[in-house]
Amino acid sequence: MMGFLNRFLILLLAIATIVMMLAVLGVYTGLIPAAIWQNELDYMLGRYETVSVTVLLLIIALRLVVVAFSRTKNDNEGYKGEYVISKNTNGEVNIALPTINALVTKVAVETLGVREAVSKVKLTKNADNTDMVIALSLVVGKEVNVASLTAKVTNDLQRQLKETLSLDSVPVNITISGITDKPANREKRVH
């Protein structure tokens, strides 16, 4: 999302561009006589303010180029924040979304037939409460039945979320992003 500062800078750059283009069109069409624009151009090129304004417009343009090519935070929105697991008069227990995300990815990758897993935990706020949705993208081996594999991953996730975090019936949306013949890597890794 573009902030106020970036919108203001675009406005300044647009106004400067419009003024310059109108001047060029006026010179080209002859509306501004050569004697006037040459005299004004000689005067402007002799002033340090011209250099200052040019450098300022260059900085604004470079800033907007950086903003245009920078990655937005909205893509990773699901990784921020915390989810309230329990709440009572003594306080509440929160768990960070990256922690839930790591648990989901670990459970998915440990399932036989899953080669790679990328998960994203998202929260949606309602009037009464906050709901959690898990989006899971899997690369699976060609030797497995996708329907039974996704059912097993979903059941394993539901069981693990219930046992570890006391979360019931969290929706899991699974997308199969690839089927590979790459052999499974079953060596134990220490993290």
Image: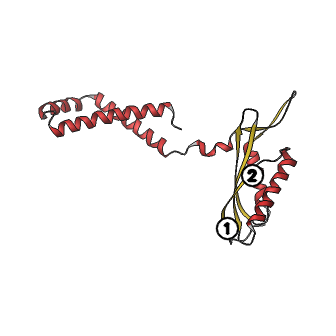
x 82%, y 48%: residue: 161
Q: Quadrant of residue 154?
A: bottom right
Q: Is residue 94 above or below residue 116?
A: above
Q: Quadrant of the C terminus?
A: bottom right
Q: Quadrant of residue 123?
A: top right
Q: Is residue 64 left or right of residue 140?
A: left
Q: Is residue 161 left or right of residue 115?
A: right
x 30%, y 28%: residue: 49
The image's colour scheme reads: secondary structure
The residue at which mark 2 appears reads as 172
Out of 67 and 154, give the one closest to the viewer: 154
Image x and y of residue 27, in percent: 18, 37
Q: Quadrant of the N terminus?
A: top right
Marked residue nearer the N-terminal end (1 or 2): 2
Q: Is residue 122 left or right of residue 11?
A: right
Image x and y of residue 187, in percent: 78, 66
Discs 1/2, front = 2
Q: Residues within 10 Å of mark 2 (few under 14, many from 20)?
A: many
Whether residue 159 is visible to the viewer of this picture, yes or no, is: yes
Q: Quadrant of residue 115?
A: bottom right
- On residue 179, the disc is 1
Q: CA distance from mark 1 to mark 2?
A: 20 Å
For the residue marked with disc 2, what is the amino acid?
Answer: Val
For the residue marked with disc 1, what is the amino acid?
Answer: Ile
Whether residue 190 is visible to the viewer of this picture, yes or no, is: no
